[in-house]
Amino acid sequence: MNALTASAAIASGRVQLANVRQSALLTAKKRALFILLAFVFLTATALMRVVQIGLFEGSPDRRSMADALVPERGEITDRNGVALARAFPSYSLWYNPKAFGEKGGSPLVKTPEEVARALVQIFPDADYDDLVRRLKSDKPSYLRKRVLPEEANHVFALGEPALEFPRENQRYYPQGSLAANVLGFVDLAGKGHVGMEQVLEPRLLDPAQRANPVALSIDARAQGALEDELGRGMLESNAKGAAGIILDVDTGEVIALASLPSFNPNRSDRVFNGLVFNRVSNQVYELGSTFKPITVAAAIDAGVITDLSVRYPTGPLNIGGFTIHDSHNFGPSLNVPEALVHSSNIVTAQIADKLGGPALRRTMMQLGMNERPTIELPARGFPLWPRGTDAKGDWARITTMTVSYGHGIAVTPLHLASAYAALVNGGIWRPATLYKVDPARVPPGRRVFKASTSARIRQLLRMIVVDGTGRKADASGFRVGGKTGSAEKPGAGGYRRTSLVATFAAAFPMDKPRYVVIAMLDEPQGTVATSGQRTSAWNAAPIVGRVVPRIGPLLGVVPDASRDVDITDLSPLVANGDGE
């Protein structure tokens, strides 16, 4: 090949190389343009979709972040903001028998019995027989609500596809069984029952209001102390039940309300077998001698009692074929302070007889004893109100006498608490409430007793604790005053001597009352812890004596041994002794 041929070949090769480069560059540009167009198309599509959603589609995706954070059911708190009930996202254990589709055959890898045994190992309180029944059924159902993540992991490890874990918003009670009878519970369908969950249902579900917690009057600290001491008293006396309430005497606010035995509202998937029954507001009892201070107050107010030193005979009273007697022999006569200190039925009956049935009946009605207790709870017991003997409804003489010492009339412990608030707060009855009350909006109430009568009753109640049947309720520095009451429960054919309701009704501090405290035991027994005694002086009074020093400092009442009610004018009238 000559030089000219070689040069031509080189030149031709260069041209071909240039053409290849140009072709590759053009291909690259086409690809880049295609990608760019695709990106523009996707971006435009996305933007159009956003516009479409924003202009034409529904609200769930248009909610603000604040709306998204609002719970499906509003929160309930105590008076200090402590959460008592709130919405809580959690897992549930769901059995899906169609996990493998509509075809026949068991959806379980293992037998229902084996799966049930494994689940009981994870959930020791589960019912084995119930689980087996559900796992053999062809119907889907909840096996458990509120499953913890670690529990879900254990169930997942069983390798059963039919066991599913839907995530749901459920009702959670952070304090467990605390104040259960106040709160009630929410069932599996999300419906509130029994307590404030039922009462507040519209408010808790209202989208415009549920973001704001509802503050109750309850103080969780005082509630815990009351439940704890009632439970201890119930165990020490082998009682079948207990009830208690702490009430603000000036506002009617319920600071604590307890009924035992109780229940855990977190287990609303269970049947509570009657444990949701509220002894404080729904069960009526003959509360015995706790009515005696009410009778004495009515007599002082009416001018029937003007001289507390006047003595009354203590022999048995025979009225219309009935005999009224005392639990002990207190000698030939007693004055009014002695009658309360020793808890004399005979003297109280004589005072009521002088007062008259219409006046005593009117006082009881002013205290709301003839109607359901005033409180927001849905379950409120109707009193067993004595029948009248004429068109006016006036009581027979024997009825007036027995009502004066708490027999022949049955009311709730809540009735008694509101009545004692009126006895010690200056004479004003106010309705009880479970809502936190604004100090500027305290209900005016209605006057039942004169202020001077209330002052005298405070002296007498304090004297009962210092010198009489309430001595075991005395808490040093807290100036407790109160009255015992032990009443036989009625039954077929009369009263059952072996079944008592033991109650102690108290208030503190008696020089400037702030709170009423009621403790009641249903059918307590004489035990070693109660020195073999069943009456309230030995079981209910000690409960109050333990509750008061626990709750006093929490509620702003500091013990002060240098202060007390002045009872120097009454002390010379009383000889120490015991009654109930």
Image (cartoon, helix red, strand yellow):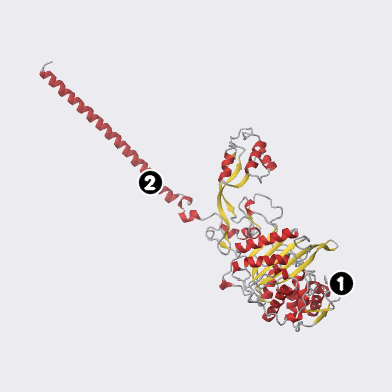
Describe residue 61's horizontal placement relative to residue 87 as left or right: left
Q: Position of residue 324 (x, y in %)?
A: 84, 72
- Position above or below: 48 against 253: above
Count of marks overlaid on the render: 2
Dot 1 amino acid type:
Thr
Neighbours of disc 2 within 10 Å: few (<14), some (14-19), many (20+): few
Q: Position of residue 432 (x, y in %)?
A: 65, 68
Q: Nearer the viewer, residue 176 or 564?
A: 564
Q: Identify the image quadrant of the C terminus.
A: bottom right
Look at 28% across and 34% down and name the residue there: 30
> In the picture, residue 552 is in which quadrant?
bottom right
Q: Which residue is mark 2?
A: 47
Which image quarter holds the N terminus? top left
- Using the rendered image of the protein, determine whether residue 406 is visible from the camera's viewpoint: yes
537 vs 136, left or right, is right
Which amino acid type is shown beneath numbered disc 2? Leu
| Residue 192 visible (yes or no) | no
User: How far across and down, in percent of the image, does residue 276 sit?
Assistant: 69, 56
Q: Is residue 19 left or right of residue 60?
A: left
As displayed, is residue 158 above or below residue 198?
Answer: above
Distance of label 2 from label 1 (alpha carbons): 94 Å
Nearest the eye: 490 or 187: 490
- Residue identified by numbered label 1: 323
Secondary element under disc 2, as helix, strand or loop, is: helix
